[in-house]
Image: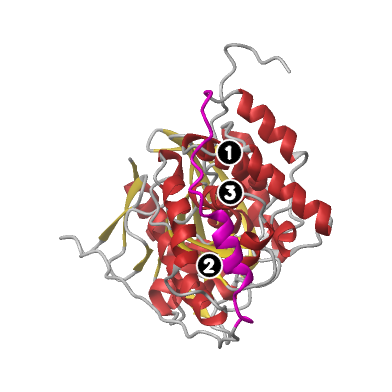
Amino acid sequence: MLVAQNAKLKEIKPGWNLFSKDQDVQMGKEYAQQVEQQMDVLPAGPLTDYVSQLGKLVAAQPQANGFPYVFKVVNDPNINAFALPGGPIFIHSAVLVNAESEGQVMGVIAHEISHVALRHSTNQVTKSNALQIPAMIAGVYGQSKGGMIGTLTQLGVGLGAQSLILKFSRGAENQADLLGARMMSQVGYNPIEMARFFEILEAKYGKGGSQFMSDHPNPGNRVKSVSDEILLMPKRDYNADTGKFERMKMLAKALPTPKKKAAPAAAGEVPNQPPQNSDGSRTWTGDRFKVSYPGEWLGLGEPNGPAVTLAPREGLKQDANGQVAVGLGVIIAHYVDDDGKFDFRADTQKLIAQIQQQNSMNRNQQPQINQNTVNGKNIYVTRLTSKSPLDGGVEVDTVVTMEHRDGMLYLVFVAPEGQMNAAQRNFDNIINSLTLQ
């Protein structure tokens, strides 16, 4: 196959995400504790040291995105591996048993590191819960005692079957294949070994027969895709093998029957609120914006993060299951479409469609997207209605989008229809105080 001399590797970037990198790390630590309590994770020893040695080589590459990676081996006869947000990576012992070379083990590790680096887990949660996530963060930081994963569980997100945290789309799989191949090459391993391991699994179990292939669906012809990618990479000698693989394979085969473990307990966290300004208001500083809001309201989120919920205590409704919804307040977050091609109106339409899809009451509405200005900046304003968690009546959700950097900032002003007039002054003050950074 001939490749143009000026052909370049396509840039692979993380997609739209309402979680900060620190929240990825927090989430990963909480889920890792759950894994440690539920699965037979091996203590420090030769197998863990071996996997960590390989993993740290890839984790040191710039494309690994600087997360605090930790590598563990799970004593499990089922072929699988999984990555949690923010850095924890677990490799089943069956991967070592079934792999045919160290390069294939490295391929699995590099693939999982790529999922973390590209933040695929929290990207998928973001796309599936665009409106609920800031409210969820309000629950974590305001009322809920279950920590980040406790509230994610209320949204149906967890470590179980079909989990958004562990089961990736074919598009995400393709990205992880290609980025993993690049990082493997950089540390001296032939990237084709990653694709060969996937081929071995498909030949042995079929496309969905193993847990690994179920969680990591084939995006297409993996071997061809990775082979094409290799042609664009700088030529290297692939001679980084440690010589330890056969011994590690024997140790993995000799592991005893996995131990059964109990379920975990969760913990909560409540951060401090910003101090009051001289006029009694508070100022929240996000990743790309700064905004003032009433001093008696709560600012709920992570400082300098991509999303925040601003609401009075009475505007947050917690149901019998502990799930928190915003019935009165403002949600502010950043949106970037995963296609990487910004189109203000088209991306506004996509965002509105995602919000509608997540709310059964407004799913069939055909909202009017109106153009306006605020503080000299062009905006789109869209009015949606839904059922209020506060009084069960009609809730008005006014979505404001504005172009900012490589995407949009969006604000959702939420209030029961009967309280809109009273809330409007606060809403006006909030949007007029907004500054973009």
Q: Earlier in the sequence, mark 2 or mark 3?
A: 2
- Discs 2/1, front: 2
Tag of residue 181: 1
Q: Which residue is mark 3?
A: 111
Q: For this rendering, which residue is in front, 298 or 183?
A: 183
Quarter holding residue 381: top right
Q: Which residue is mark 2?
A: 73
Q: Element type at marker 3?
A: helix
- Residue stretch rendered in magenta on the structure: 234-258
**Total marks drawn?**
3
Image coordinates of residue 288 in percent, x first then y, are 37, 44
Q: Tell whether 60 sits left or right of 398.
A: left
Residue pictured at 65% horizontal, 52% vertical: 354
- The answer, for residue 150, to whether it is visible in the render is no
Most distant residue in the left direction: 278
Q: Amino acid at mark 1?
A: Ala
Q: Element type at marker 1?
A: helix
SS majority, magenta: loop
Q: CA distance from mark 3 to mark 1?
A: 8 Å
The figure's colour scheme reads secondary structure
Quarter holding residue 98: bottom right
